[in-house]
Image: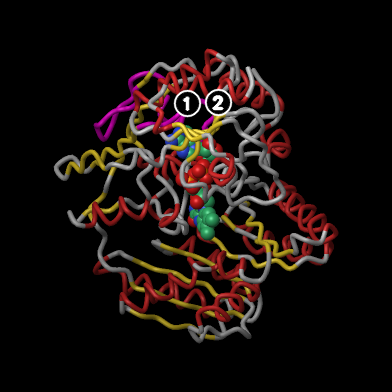
Amino acid sequence: MDRQAFGALLTSRLPPEIVVLDPDVIAAHSGDRSEFLAPGRPWALLRPRDTSEVAAAVRVCADHGVPIVPRGAGSGVAGGAVAGDGCVVLSVMAMDRIHEIDTANLLAVVGPGVLNADLCDAVAAHGLWYPPDPASRAICSIGGNVATNAGGLCCVKYGVTREYVLGLEVVLADARVCSVGRRTVKGVAGYDLTALFVGSEGTLGIVTEVTLRLRPAPPPAVTMTAFFDSLADAGRAISAISTSTTPSLLEVMDATTLAAVEAWTRMDLDTSAAALVLAQSDSGAGAVDQLAAMAAAARRAGASYVAETADPDEGAQLLTARRLAYPALERLGAAVMNDIAVPLGGVTAAIGAVEEIARRHDVRVGTFGHAGDGNLHPTVVFDRHDPDSVARAEAAYHDMAAAALALGGTITGEHGIGLLKRDHLEHEAGAAAIDLQAAIKGALDPDGILNPGKVLNRRG
Ligand SMILES: Cc1cc2nc3c(=O)[nH]c(=O)nc-3n(C[C@H](O)[C@H](O)[C@H](O)COP(=O)(O)OP(=O)(O)OC[C@H]3O[C@@H](n4cnc5c(N)ncnc54)[C@H](O)[C@@H]3O)c2cc1C
């Protein structure tokens, strides 16, 4: 079967309005926010509006062995939604309804195409909160968050996406619709298939509905900013704050990132500092004491300047500076955001290793991230039109994964493996664990039609 014949088949077997064959529109949906990867030429883009249309689409593709690349909003940075030649891209973004907000049972049932920020706004109207808050929350979908087990700024206290997914509806590789999980707070019936699908990057099934746990909105947060003359001092402060207080947010930005954000926002950030540590507490009556303890820890670690504020607007503005870190670095050139995580005590060493890698490859790196989780996003800025610059950026990017492993960490804290980190996975997981993962893939998708080549290098 060729592109034209398969396009005609899709149009005859599916509602024609969900089938897109225009090459320009398909191309616009064939990549994500990763670097170093060239998308291929998919045969079609499908935009199903409900589960039955997803199942029908999978049926046609499965019958003809045509691979499917599921995609949400395309904000991924690991190449998980990068599509190759001769496949079908399946966007879930038309499935963007919030089906239910159950205030009595603290849960929401949503389509996978709902944007994270839209869900947060909708539940906030009921005095509720959905904590996992990627910095990209305005431009990423809940389905994508589930597929990557996304983290965010609040995760240091409230946990990542997996902690909030109670149940899923998934279309399997053979087009069956499967419900896993529950609506109850607790539940241990059988193997935890919900947890298996969370973080599976579209390789085991297509998520068509998500049941999410909500929380009552927390009290307003109080905020501390601490500037440091050295990254080592900042690392010591992060360590002390993590181990002696309960921050609801603990983030770091290095000098390169600070300068990029300041150049863009003119917020009056101290660009002579080597690092800014941003911490919050939302512990209600105890928050001010928590903040004082954090500030004391920052001063003991050698902070050059510490400020505390209980003004929520000021706190929100400082958070905006952090959320703008990556787009601010992108203004300096092409930017590839890495995602490494180390045990809490290893943050200083990880930042040091990143600096050494930047020197070795002669690249510009801005490091920021969820320091309270030991999760850093060293971002290499490079020139996409200069092959030498691209090669140095790519080498630095991959060396960072190796450095994280050498520090007892992981090659990805929250962005996933996608295509970009596939070759590093075996080094982290080991051959036996890779065998298990391949066996799971083989059991759920024996013909390898779901997002082939992502996560694992080989089939089960
Ligand atoms: C500026 C910026 C900041 C970011 N900050 C964070 C952050 O703080 N924390 C964080 O975790 N990530 C962050 N990210 C990365 C990204 O936003 C997340 O990985 C997000 O979860 C991807 O969602 P998406 O809808 O864009 O998914 P896509 O990019 O469209 O897809 C990502 C993966 O999920 C799969 N997928 C998508 N939808 C489905 C579905 N319905 N069923 C099955 N598989 C599916 C795709 O096949 C792909 O493998 C950031 C990205 C940017 C650009």
Q: Is residue 121 magenta?
A: no
> Do the CB atoms of the residues marked 2 and 1 lie less than 8 Å apart?
yes
Up/down of 71 relative to 438, above or below: below
Q: CA distance from mark 2 to mark 1?
A: 7 Å
Q: Which residue is mark 2?
A: 450
Q: Main secondary structure of the magenta part?
A: loop
Give the residue at mark 1: 205
Give the camera-side residue of 290 and 158: 158
Vertical placement of residue 351 versus 302, above or below = above
Q: Position of residue 342 (x, y in %)?
A: 62, 52
Query: Closest to the observer: 336 or 186?
Result: 336
Mark 1 near ligand 1 (CB under 8 Å)? yes
Q: Position of residue 80 (x, y in %)?
A: 58, 40
Q: Is residue 189 magenta?
A: yes
Residue 316 shows up from this direction: yes
Q: Image quadrant of residue 138? A: bottom left
Q: Residues within 10 Å of mark 1 (few under 14, many from 20)?
A: many
Highlighted range, magenta: 179-208
Task: Look at the image and tell me in which quarter the C terminus lies.
Answer: top right
Query: Which residue is depicted at the point 46% across and 30% down?
Result: 197
Q: Position of residue 215 (x, y in %)?
A: 26, 50
Residue 430, image quadrant: top right
State which tag comes first along the sequence, 2 or 1: 1
Q: Nearer the viewer, residue 434 or 326?
A: 326
